[in-house]
Every structure is written in structure tokens, then in C-alpha cells.
Image (cartoon, rainbow, N blue to C red):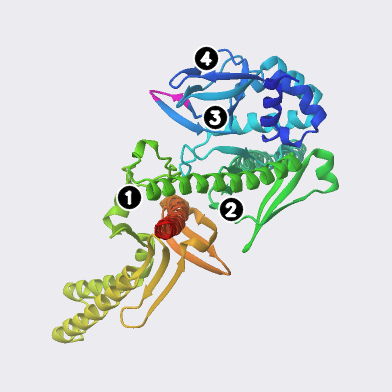
Amino acid sequence: MTSGNHENLTFLKSLFPFNLLEDSSLHQIAPLFERVSLAAGSHVFREEDAADALFFIISGKVRITLHKKDSINTLSLLSIGDHFGEDSLGKNAFYSTAAVCETRVLALRISHKNICSISNGIPKVWSAFSLFQKTYRLARKISLPWRSEEETLHLISRRHPFFLFLRVILIGGGSLLTFAILLFFAFTSLELSLFFLILSILVLGLGVVITGWAALEWTNDYFIITRDRVLVQKQLIGFFESRHESPVSAILSTGIDTSVWGRMFGFGSVTMRSYTGDLRFARLPFPHLIYELLEYRRQQAMLETRHQEQAGMRSSLMQRLEPGVTQKKLIKPKSSVKPTSSVYQTGSFSDLLAKFFNLRYEKEGSVILRTHWWILLRKTALPGLFLLLVILGIAVRLIGFFGLFPETLVYLVALFLSLAGWGWWFYQYLDWHNDIYILTHDQLIDVSRKPLGSEERRSAPIKNIQTVEFTRKGLIGLILNFGTVRIQIGNEELTFDNIYNPSQVQSEIYMRFKEFSERMKRNEQQRLADWIKTYDEIRQEKSKEESSSSGIENE
């Protein structure tokens, strides 16, 4: 084996799905990969170029861009171990994205012809390439505003198509059967033919709507694995929307469940276990392969964390031991945290109302959230109705009704009731106003303060976050974009109820968790560097003392 093939073989052993293959299979496919070096700023390929190769990055960074309308959007910023050029895995004649080298890049290249050869000979690799291709297609189509460009997507999957076909057959078939029966009665009945005809048309229309709704519900359920986290994102149109996520580092173990039907049709469930419970990927295609991908990501996450810590430690030691070293020579780990916006940027009517009611504002680096203005309307609805009735009563008295009661008495009663009504309304307003949630750099705080009562304050450290989930339930919640964010911290659960744009809040909590984790790592590295510097100073002092004492003895 040549040195080039040996290097390719070593690198392939560290890549998914080639890490699942036997050494004999790896020895066969290693010569099919070509090692290429690409200069910084060069295009690996452009949109509409012939899709003739797949690439695996050995070193460097590659930016994948997608042209949409009049703008060019970054799909991903890929680094070591990532792959690109997925258009070559299928029958696409051309690339639908562009790849640009951000730095000098060293990569393994495999041609479309050799891809077909490997896929035909090794079913496990063919299945993995199918997952790569489906993930790539979905990543181009769906919007994931919570993801930063450096958070590589390793998997986006829907449930197995068997369950889509099952829904369509059962609902659509049942509707067609009912339609046929009613249509038969319409043609055979003399007196009720028009009734059965109208009913059959209604049943058919309802069946089409329900079948379409069921199909859309299937298309809106996603199971996602990124470089940093795993997610289950669901949307039941018109009823609820949710996203349940957990950092990869919080996963303790993974498991897989398949049934007889699952093994027959190729679907199963993958479960991720953490300290707080399970996150379940249910009814997925290629369940065993997704299980292996999760295990691979867990191991890679630990390796990446270790490498980042080593790079950070080296940088800290260089700063302590060699203060004169220029910053250009220091290796400074780049933060992977995506900054979140602190203002309402869409300009939508919902954002304008949220800004008017001050549902989100920042103070001294902390974010303060209030419950949605719809909750304020609900709380003040009864006091408002009461005040409206008082006004109507005064208007009726002015017209001439209630003549049996003295005018002064009526107005005094109205004044008293108005004051009571406004007091009630203002109490409900303060109750809403004083119910706040606070995101600091290291804590999540839930403050509930009654206007004339006690204050309840719950807090939890960000560093102990295990899972973060948001839900938007009901038609009102979906239309007005408010819901609940649940944060699992150890054995406790903290909830941010009825807040505006819960998806953004969930993302911000996760980003603050990432920021805190990175800050703690840097502090620990600095602390250890200080210890090592102190040790080095003590060692030098001892060395000087020994040199001085030996010089005196020689004299």
C-alpha cells in the first residue's frame, strides 16, 4: 500500500460511515479517494457545475452558499470531517450550491463513478449516502433560524414514508369508500337522492382536506442532529408547534427499538437518554444507521471539546509564559455561539405590538421577558366588561331610565363602581406586569409578584441545563406566536409560560448556555495556566538558589 492510500485509510477510519466498515472493505475503497489541495478563496465548484464528485474535508474550512432570488445565503460553514457535494450522490447532473474555500483546504475527493461502485458493493455505505442526500435536500428547503452557519447539520429526517402512505390510504381510502356508498344511495334512492348527493360531495371534500392536512403534518415533523445538539421539531397545523432539544454533551446513552413490522419495512425508533429523561426519534428510516451516527457524534463531540481545550490551554500558557508573543501567533479558539438579536427585526404587526407592550427588553446584559399581551387582555377582560356596564348604566340613566332612583344616588353609586372597576383593572395589569422571566449570563429566573401580596422567585443555573423545549398550542397561540418554554435543569423543571416568540427564546437560552460553557472553559484554562506559571516561577527560583549556593561552596 502506498503512503497516500495509507493516509486515506487512516482518515476514512475516523469518518462516518466508513468507521463502521471492516478493514478489508476499507482497503478496497481507499484507493478510490483522491487527495486534493485547494487554495484559500478558490471555488471547489459553482452552481450549475457538473455534479461529478463528493468531498470530505481533512483540514481547512469550506463555505457552502445557495443562491435564492436576488441574494446569496450561506448554507453551512464546514470544517474537519464534514462532507459536501451531495448532489453527486444522486442523479443530479449539476450542483445546486456553490463551495468556496475560506482557508487552504485539504480534502478527499471521490468521483461519481466510484461513489456508485462503493454504493453497489456496500449496502451500509449506500444507506448512509442516502441519508446525506436527504439531509442536504431538506437543508436547502426548510428554514432553521435557530442554527448558526458553523453548526453543521448531520441529519434531517422525517418519519418513514410508510406512515405517510398509511395515513393517505386509511384516510383517503375511507373517504373514497364512504363517498362511493353515499353516491350509490344518491342514484338508487328516489326521495333522498339530492340529500345523498350533497352529503357525498361534502364527505369527499372533507376527506381531501383531512388527507392533505395529515400529509402536511407528516412533512412538518423533523428529527435533526447537528454538531452541537439533537432536536425533535414538530408542528400540527392549526393546533401546536414544538421543538425539543438537548446538547450532545448531555446525552448519556442511546438505544434503538424495532418491531417486526419495523424490521420488515425498515423503520424504528432511536432513544437518547439524559439525566432528566428521554428524547425519542420515532419511526425513522435507517434506524440502526442513525443510531451509529448518534454514537459517532457523541464521540466526536468529546474529541472536539478536548482539542478545543488543548488549543485554549496552549494559548493561555503562551500568554503567561511568553508575554511578548504577538497575538498573531496565539491560537485563539473561535466562539461557535451565534449572537441573537435584541430587537424586533421583522417589522410585522406582531413585533410592533410586542414592542409596544415591552414584552422583551434588556437591562445590564440581562434579558427581561413578560407574558404575552393576550394574557393581559384575558386578565383585564372582566374588569373591562364591568366598567363598560357601569358606563352603559350611566348612559341609560341619562336617557331617562331608573327614574325612581335619585340622580345623585345613581351617580355616586356609578362613581364608586367605577373606582372599584378601575382598581380591579389596575390590579390585573400589575399582576401581568410583575410576572417576568429573566435571562442573565449565568442564571434563569422566574419572578412572580402579586400587587398586594408576596413575591415568589425561582432561579436555576444555566450550566445545569439538560434539555430545552418550546410549545405553541392552540390556534390563538399559533396566530399570535406565543407559547411555553420548558427548561429541564437537573431534577427540576423551569417554565417560561405564555411568552412571545418562544422559538427565539429557546434559541437564546441555548446560546447563553453555550456562552457560559465556553466562558467557564476559558476561566478554567486561565486558572490552570496561572498554576503552571506559578510552578515555573518557583522552579526558576529554586534553580537560582541552587546555583547561588553551589557558587558559594566553590568559593
Residue 497: x and y, percent? 45, 64
Magenta stretch contains residue 478: no
Q: Indicate left or right for 541 with 251 as reference.
A: left
Q: Please report whichever mark, 2 or 3, sits nearer to the chain's N-terminal start.
A: 3
Kindly tell me whether residue 192 is visible in this rendering: no
Amino acid type, label 4 = Glu
Amino acid type, label 1 = Ser
Q: CA distance from mark 1 to mark 2?
A: 27 Å
Q: CA distance from mark 1 to mark 4?
A: 38 Å
Q: Could you tell me which secondary element the residue under label 2 belongs to?
A: helix
The residue at which mark 3 appears reads as 59
Near-viewer residue (428 or 526): 526
**Residue depth check, mark 4 versus mark 3: number of the one nearer the observer:** 3
Q: Please report whichever mark, 3 or 1, sits nearer to the chain's N-terminal start.
A: 3
Quadrant of the rendered structure where residue 403 is?
Answer: bottom left
Identify the mark at residue 342; answer none if there is no mark. 1
Report the predominant secondary structure element of the magenta stretch. strand
Residue 269: x and y, percent? 73, 48
Identify the mark at residue 48; answer none if there is no mark. 4
**Residue located 35% across and 68% down the image:** 381
Q: Quadrant of the N terminus?
A: top right
Kindly tell me whether residue 490 is visible in this rendering: yes
Q: Which segment did they paint magenta?
A: 65-71
Q: Indicate left or right for 487 with 286 as reference.
A: left
Q: Please report whichever mark, 1 or 2, sits nearer to the chain's N-terminal start.
A: 2
Identify the mark at residue 249; answer none if there is no mark. 2
